[in-house]
Structure formats: C-alpha cells, structure tokens
Image: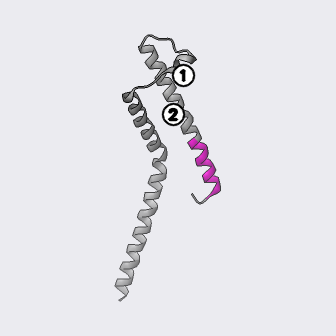
Amino acid sequence: MDDPDTDRLLAMVMALVGEVAVLKERLDTHERLAIAGQVATPEAIEAFEPDTDVERGREVWRTELLGRVFRSIRAAESSTERSATEQKWRSLVDEAAAE
C-alpha cells in the first residue's frame, strides 16, 4: 500500500483476523470435545490434538476467511489493472488513428 494509514489499518485488520482464526479453532475444539463426551476444560482444550482431516478442514476455513477479507483489495486491484490496460489500449488506438 502507498499510504501509511492504510498500512496501519491493514495491520490491525490482520491482527483481528488472526484472533478470529484462533477463536474459531478453539470453538471447534470445544465442539469436538463435546461430541466425544468430554468436558472442555482449559487443560483438555490445550491437550487436544486435531487429526489430519480436522487440520485440513481448519486450513480450508482459514483460506476462505482470508479470501473474504482480501476480496475488496483484490477487486480494487483488478479494477485498477483493467483501467490501466484500457488506458494503454485507448492510447494505442489514438496513436494508430492519428497516423
């Protein structure tokens, strides 16, 4: 980003996204312990070891979360790139028409 305020805002948003991801994983752990009939004590939560399928599911969720968070930035970049490409194209057309 070109603006320091935007950089700071993005850093704050990313810190919050990290906290949301941690909360989501802890909630998922609570739910899995409940399904297993275990009490979700702090010790049980810390001792929980997700298997490969659980880790894969969590990774998919994190990837989707980041996709949702960055969607507007990607859309703006795509729009800017399209605009720049259109300007270059128009410039070429104008040059060709002037010849």
Residue at horizontal 48 percent and vertical 47 percent from the top: 70
Query: Looking at the picture, how far across and down is residue 55, in whole percent?
Result: 41, 31
Q: In this view, does 42 lie above or below 98?
A: above
Q: In this view, does 58 lie above or below 90?
A: above
Could you say which is closer to the camera, residue 95 or residue 39? 39
Colour mode?
one colour
Q: What residue type is labelled 1?
A: Glu
Q: Is mark 1 on a helix, strand or loop?
A: helix
Q: Please, which residue is most extreme toward the bottom here?
A: 99
Q: What residue type is labelled 2?
A: Ala
Q: In this view, does 73 lie above or below 37?
A: below
Marks 1/2: CA distance? 16 Å
Packing grade of label 1 (10 A; few <14, some 14-19, many >=20) is few
Front: mark 1 or 2: 1
Q: In this view, does 4 lie above or below 26?
A: below
Residue at horizontal 36 percent and vertical 79 percent from the top: 93
Q: Mark 1 points at which residue?
A: 46
Q: Mark 2 points at which residue?
A: 21
Determine the main secondary structure of the stretch shown in magenta: helix
Packing grade of label 2 (10 A; few <14, some 14-19, many >=20) is some
Query: Looking at the picture, how far across and down is residue 68, in whole percent?
Result: 45, 42
Q: Is mark 2 on a helix, strand or loop?
A: helix
Viewport quadrant of the N terminus:
bottom right
**Residue 38 located left or right of residue 12:** left
Magenta highlight range: 3-14
Could you say which is closer to the camera, residue 96 or residue 61? 61
Q: In which quarter of the image is residue 14?
A: top right
Could you say which is closer to the camera, residue 84 or residue 60? 60
42 magenta-colored: no
Q: Quadrant of residue 34?
A: top left
